Image (cartoon, grey):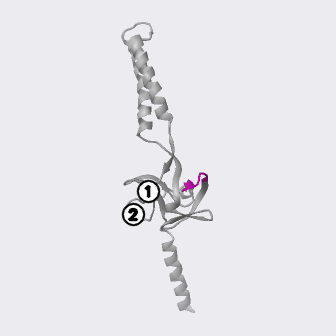
Amino acid sequence: MKPKRFLILTLLIFAANFGFAQKQLVLLKGEKVMLRLNPGDEFIISLKGEKRKLNSYINNLFDTAVMLHKTMIPIHNIDKIYFKHSAFINRFGTFLVVGGVAYFVVDQFNTVVVRGDDASLDESVTAVSAVMVAVGLPMMLAKKRYQRLGGRHRLIVVEEGSPFYAAPVRGLEDEP
């Protein structure tokens, strides 16, 4: 009777250790990680040859497939992944907007405080500031909502030993 208990206890301990290795779904652009998803995360995709979106959560990850709720989707059938992300153009647009407003404010500060004149609009400063804001605002607000897979963008499943793996951030359940 005791060898059976020992064997069962040993199997349970080994099974618990194997349960800690959680996989992640990673979207790569070349060697750069653009998106990292864990089981339980929301996953919005469209499949090749279909126009409709699938909106679900990741139930499980396999080497070549993703299980969404109760549906198994092969990774090579995924055409687009929907998520919000910013690019260089968004950051440059923000720089233009902030720079245009700052240029106008600094000119007004210089006119009123430093020179002691009344507040007035300098045509060249106003024109440059307005152009910077007008060009930068659409660049700042235009966010890409999805990423098409193929070429440099690929979707892979990684495990704990991979250089692309990052430990999932724990929520409030870890706090005392």
Question: In the rendered view of the protein, which quadrant contains the C terminus?
Answer: bottom right
Q: Amino acid at mark 2?
A: Ser
Q: Quadrant of residue 161 in the image?
A: bottom left
Q: Secondary structure at mark 2?
A: loop
121 up-or-down from 49: above or below: above
- Residue 57's spot in the image, x, y percent? 59, 58
113 up-or-down from 27: above or below: above
Q: Nearer the viewer, residue 83 or 116?
A: 83
* Name of the residue lying farthest toward the top: 117
Residue 176 magenta: no
- Residue 140's spot in the image, x, y percent? 47, 34
- Residue 10's spot in the image, x, y percent? 50, 82
Mark 2 residue crowding within 10 angstroms, few (<14) / some (14–19) / many (20+): few
Q: Which mark is residue 154?
A: 1
The answer for how far apart the CA atoms under marks 2 and 1 are is: 16 Å
> Counting residues from the N terminus, which is met first, the one under dot 2 or under dot 1?
1
Q: Nearer the viewer, mark 2 or mark 1?
A: 1
Q: Which residues are magenta?
A: 44-53
> Which residue position is annotated with label 2?
162
13 up-or-down from 64: above or below: below
Q: Residue at x 56, y 54 (%)?
A: 46
Q: Residue at x 42, y 15 (%)?
A: 108
